[in-house]
Amino acid sequence: MRFLIQRVSHASVETEGTVIGKIKKGFLVFIGICEEDNREIADKMIRKLIGMRIFEDENGKTNLSLEHVSGELLLISQFTLYADCKKGNRPSFIKAGNPEFANTMYEYIISECQKQVPVVQTGSFGADMKISLVNDGPFTIMLDSDEIC
């Protein structure tokens, strides 16, 4: 499982010309699922995400979590986080989880985040989406379950 986390001052997602999710200060999180993932891995990734202290405190140190800043989440499913670019110039996506499984895991992640974060917005699984954001920092972190679980 991979979470690409961007600290944002605001972000939104639209599909077919309609905004379907938007947040103020918080994290825009692109979520990649592979076939080996499960709820236990998702739970560890969510704990790491929610506890991530990358907002600045009164001294300018990155020491505050989502909770401390009343941060919001925008969760977007993105199978391209499992792109394999080793051969040629056209990426392969065979490492990404099959859509049915990936959607089940994505929905699980959403429901678990909603238990801990008051504002959780989402994209639309499998849809063509347009993402707008202002990356605050810029600050971008990749969480990979192969490295933290």
Image (cartoon, grey):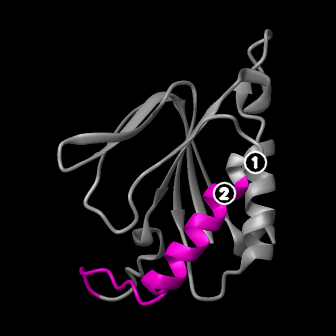
As for residue 53 lying within the magenta part, the answer is no
- Contact flag, marks 2 and 1 (Cβ < 8 Å): yes
User: Mark 2 and mark 1: span between their CA atoms?
Assistant: 7 Å
Q: Which residue is mark 2?
A: 111
Tell which residue pokes out farthest to the top in this image: 58
Queried whether the magenta region covers residue 107, the answer comes back as: yes
Q: Measured along the vertical axis of the image, is residue 103 above or below residue 72?
A: below
The quadrant of the image that shows the N terminus is bottom right
- Report the magenta residues as a range: 88-112
Taking the spot 74% from the left edge, 57% from the top edge, the residue there is 46
Q: Secondary structure at mark 1?
A: loop
Q: Amino acid at mark 1?
A: Lys
Q: Which percent across, then down, holds residue 147?
A: 75, 70
Tell me residue 133's x, y (percent): 39, 34
Q: Nearer the viewer, residue 29 or 101?
A: 101
Q: Which residue is mark 1?
A: 115
Measured along the vertical axis of the image, is residue 108 above or below residue 61? below
